[in-house]
Image (spheres, grey):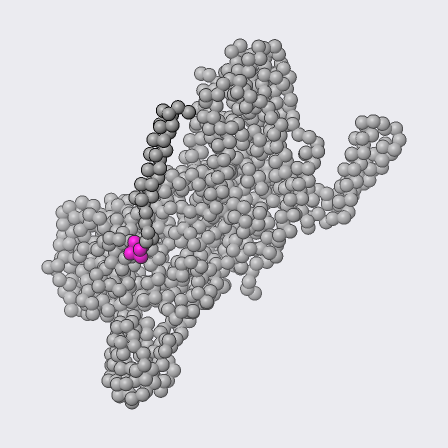
Amino acid sequence: MSRRDFLSRSVKAGVLVAAAGSLSYWLYDGKGPDPASQSSGDNVVLPDFSIGDLGGRMSIITGEDRGKTVDLGLKAIGGIERFIRKNDRVLIKVNAAFATPPILSATTNPQLLSEVVDLCLKAGASSVVVTDNPINDPQSCFALSGIGEAVRSAGAKLMLPTGSSFASTTVPKAKLIRDWPLLYAPFEGVNKVIGIAPVKDHHRSGASMVMKNWYGLLGGRRNIFHQNINDIILELAMMVKPTLVILDGTTTMMTNGPTGGSLSDLKQTNCMIVSTDQVAADAFGASLLGKKPADLPFILKAQDAGLGTADYESLKLVRERAG
Amino acid sequence: MRIVTVRRISQIFFLLLFFWFCIVSTFGEQWWQLRGWPVDWFLQLDPLVAVGTMLTTKTLYAGLLWALATVILTIVLGRFFCSWVCPFGTLHHMVGYLGKRGKTLSRKAEVNEYHWGQSIKYYLLVFLLTAAAGALMARTVRAAFAVPAILWFLVAATIVVVALALFGLTGRLRKTAAILLALVGGWTLLGLLYSMEQLIGASLQTGLLDPIPLVYRSVNLVLLPLVDSEYQVLSITQRHYEGAWLIGAIFIAALLLNLRTPRFYCRYICPLGALYGVLSRFSLWRVGKKQSECVQCKLCEANCEGACEPTNTIHLSECVLCMNCLDDCGHDLMGYQTIPSASGEIVSPDMSRRGFVVALASGVLAVPMIRLGGYTDQNWNPAVIRPPGALSEADFLSRCIKCGQCMRVCPTNIIQPAGLEAGLEGLWTPTLNFRVGTSGCQLNCIACSHVCPTAAIRPITLEEKHGREAFADVGPIKLGCAFVDRGRCLPWAMDKPCIVCQETCPVSPKAIFVREYFSTVRNGVVEVVRSDSETLEIAGISFQPGQLSTGDFFIKLLTEPEGKRRPIVDNADRTLAVDPRMPFLKELPLGTRVEIQVRLQRPQIDPKLCIGCGVCEHECPVSGKRAIRVSAENESRSKRRSMLL
């Protein structure tokens, strides 16, 4: 071997040794991962979407035609224009929990949704997004409940919960919703939030109405919260401060809730509740199920937390009959 | 236009069509999603699917009639499917092209020489088809004894053959007679010794190697989930398939083998190609030389896809009609013509009699041997839950071709390819896994039963699935039954309220109901230190503030009657506040003993109502091994598995 070859080879070997050495030095970790590195990092917090200066308003409209009752209900509390302004970007949280047809009333009624989307767009909203993270298969839920079709034909946008739709949230002062995945993507760029839910029997919590409906914004294995159902509903109400809630009591699911599954589980109760106060809406909704607000601990808890009032009569309440 | 250009257009067209069918097998409302697209079409064109199910079921199911077209065309034209239609063949063709690049002409011609291994696929075909034909063959053997005419014919034939063998025959004829005698005698003996139907079953295993189910399975269960994980067009969440690695590894290995030998799979393994090889024996048109003499330049073999040696005596059953030789021959000596090749042709597959018999016997024996495991009998595995509409296990196995269409179309992703849990013959057949996916089996979905190309999952209606109208007497289709694991269930084992299972049960009335039970919390019998109408101060135990205020905790005075409890609305560490609507009427004496109880609703299954949909199992918050699990007991498809009177 020539001296030249030997030197050349020595240089190359030296570079490789140095590279291996510096890589090891650079990546050396004498401690191993610390426990803090296991947490998910930054948390998002939902802003307050309510319109502060309006105070508590609520309307209860009796009637069978959801289009008419919701229309009248909104007029009764000041008109949609008081809530949705030009160029607002609206998010509607529906209840699409189950892959069942609209006639079984386990999900938000598509006709009602169409009407609300339509009113928002007419009031000048630049976009309306509809979302939910259902219990059953999401695509089946939106297809079978008729909500998907209603969203498309009304000109809104459906946002399904994909793997990347979630961000960690910690609700201030909450005990349960800490560092928990929230269906956040639909909220991005949104400045108004409307919740639309049917009135349903629920064996664990006593009732599933507008406050419980926010459950569908959680991701992960959220079912563990059923161990403390009243506090989780309270915290959901703490998490979302909506612009408006609409509680659909046209058909109430009296038994076998929240899935229903049979027409015999349903009862015509013919009323539509539109409210700025979600606690008040649920307090009235309880009566449709033959319950008192005090029978539902989550309502009292939400009232005590200052999220609204169970005494809906104390609000600026309008009762009317449609048609 | 050159014939090879036409072929390439055809290949690309059918490959794209195949991918399109894979993509549109997506549940949804968009125009490109499942809308009566004939997504099974390639499976229906596949005569191996048709022949296999014909052997096992003696019927030709609906769309499989398409295979007749393929069969007729193959009989007339030869193995056109392989080089013109087959999507798997096209993929091999493309990878093989990459493998050939940079090789010299002689090297190219060398890898395309006929190899004895090409007969392996015929043995595989015989093996797979006889495994499928077991029951039919057993019936035929038995028929000899049930039908007197056949019996007397056999007796007469035996006597004649014996007589001939003893007198007058010599040499080859004598040997033939001996073989005939052995066959007839063997048949008679078998029929006498064994009631064959008991022993021999039919098992359709063609799908393991049949290229069409293989490519459907590989693309739908491996390729698409990988590609779509980024874009989430086909599914909003990542699709998972158990054991996908094996399906993927076989697919990739089959493709990579083309780098070594072009169309390795087609030449050596493909049982469908073997079937075509047999069918093409009498083809009216065939590739061959127009004159025997040529310069032996081997140009025609450089790109020969089938390794059928067009230069010399052509192996007709190996020719895949790629037409490359027609295009490559500089002297225009190759033709696709009605006359046989001028250099002669070998029309039959290269199989030895011995090999044929071994393959046949192995096929016949493999099924009873596998069934000794008892998976279709007493030893059935309750963890194997079949999709709604699936036939009873043995019938199911005689139809399922493991194509994975049901797994692809299932909107919830719960239909999974089985590993060995359904026995060896159940490999890659559909089973339900309620831990993966987005929910249980959706009450209002019957997609899998309608996509199944062979009716292993027979087409059902929603009325039948729900047990409504005409099916009201039979009741709903049950996939199994849910069982509560009381050692894991939160209300049963841990004194925690839950009942997510009850909440999500989609049946009306619910198949899961609850029994209320008040359980005294740990160290929860305490003495009162001080009290007024709405609050108590206790000794001995302290709680976190608010711990008992969830609405689930109660105070029970030991002195008061059973059934009277006061809800706790708030607590500090040793102070409990009760519901003001139920105050204590008088101050409790010091040392009064009270119990702090938690109200539990304990889930209970009504097996008459449970349909085994698995929504409860999917939603159970005990997320590892679920506290409520469906198992296949009580499934409707098999009476022997019913659980109730």
Quadrant of the drawing holding the C terminus of chain A? bottom left
Q: Is residue A107 left or right of residue B381?
A: left
Picture layout, residue B257 above or below residue B436: above
Place residue A203 in its image quadrant. bottom left
Picture layout, residue B169 above or below residue A62: above
Magenta span contains residue B310: no
Picture layout, residue A59 above or below residue B287: below
Outermost residue toward the front in this view: A3
Of B500 and B68, the residue lying toward us: B500
Q: Position of residue A187 (x, y in %)?
A: 23, 50
Of B293 and A69, the residue lying toward us: B293
Q: Is residue B245 left or right of residue B574?
A: right
Q: Position of residue A275 (x, y in %)?
A: 19, 60
Residues in magenta, as a range: A34-39
The residue under the point 44% across, 16% down is B1
The residue under the point 48% across, 39% down is B249
Q: Is residue A318 left or right of residue B56?
A: left
Outermost residue toward the right in this view: B167
Of A80 and B305, the residue lying toward us: B305
